[in-house]
Each structure stands twice: as structure tokens, then as C-alpha cells.
Image: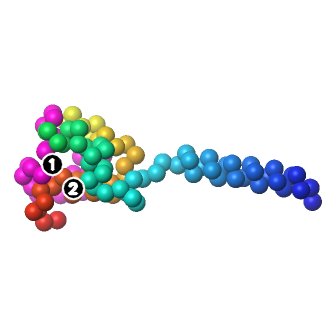
Amino acid sequence: MDHNYSTKNSSVFLSVVVWIVLMTPQSTCATTTGKAIYNKACKQCHASGIAGAPVIGDTQWILRLKRKGLEGLVKSVKNGLNAMPAGGMCSQCSESDYKKAIKYMLPKNMPM
């Protein structure tokens, strides 16, 4: 067996594996909290209510949640709503990430 051939194949294989890992989009949900997602992607509009965005902790969320449910709110983020673009400001977020961020923005005394 040609040792150089085997080493070359191992190097090529390892390079391909590293490339795949680096190029695969990573969800933030495994290590990120709703607060971190909010601070990264939602705060710009939801802290002050820019363009009609419901403000974090505001009672507007109660009506929206009753009307749409959590899945409906996630759908609004995924598809975009009014001035909010599809995916909000977190195109790499998963559905789980969106749920974490929405739950973080709800009034703290609101049952889920």
C-alpha cells in the first residue's frame, strides 16, 4: 500500500469534513437564551416600538398571543409583518429561537 496515497486521501477527507462543518448554518437555539436572541435581533425595534412593533413586556403581546397563538406569532416572524422583514433580523434563527425570543418579550406575569 502506498503510504503517501493514504495520507493524501486522509488529508482530503479531513479538509472536506472541516469545510462542511464550517459552511453548515448553525442555529443559535442550543446555546442562546431568548434574552440573547432579543438583544441581537429584536431589540432594535421592540425596545421602543419602531414602526408599530409591540414593545417588550407591553400588554399588546397579550392580545396578539390570544389572537394568533405562539405558532401564529412565529409564523409572523418567519414571513415578516408590516415593517418587519421575513425572519425578523435573525435570518439564521430556527423556529425554536423565534419562540425563545417571543417568550422573552411577553409580559413577565403572563402565563404560557
Q: Which residue sits at x=42%, y=53%?
A: 27
What amino acid is found at the position of numbered circle 2 in the picture?
Tyr
Q: Position of residue 90 (x, y in %)?
A: 34, 43
Indicate left or right for 98 with 19 as reference: left
- What whole-number distance in Å separates the C-alpha atoms at marks 1 and 2? 8 Å
Q: Nearer the viewer, residue 78 or 103?
A: 103
Q: Which residue sits at x=39%, y=58%?
A: 31
Q: Sequence order check: which comes first, mark 1 or mark 2?
A: 1
What amino acid is found at the position of numbered circle 1 in the picture?
Ile
Residue 17 marker: none
From the image, tell me which residue sits under label 2.
Answer: 104
Q: Nearer the viewer, residue 31 or 94?
A: 31
Q: Which residues are magenta?
A: 50-79
Query: The residue tagged with tag 2: helix, strand or loop?
Result: helix
Dominant SS in magenta: helix
Q: Nearer the viewer, residue 73 or 51?
A: 51
Number of callouts: 2
Q: Is residue 66 visible?
A: yes
Indicate left or right for 27 with 108 as reference: right
Q: Which residue sits at x=30%, y=51%?
A: 36
Name the quadrant containing residue 41. Answer: top left
Name the quadrant containing residue 87. Answer: top left
Q: Is residue 79 visible?
A: no
Residue 56 marker: 1
Residues tagged 1 and 2 counted as in contact (Cβ below 8 A): yes
Looking at the image, residue 82 lies above or below residue 98: above
Asked whether residue 78 is drawn in magenta, I would say yes
Specify the color scheme: rainbow
Query: The residue tagged with tag 1: helix, strand or loop?
Result: loop
Where the C terminus falls, by quadrant?
bottom left
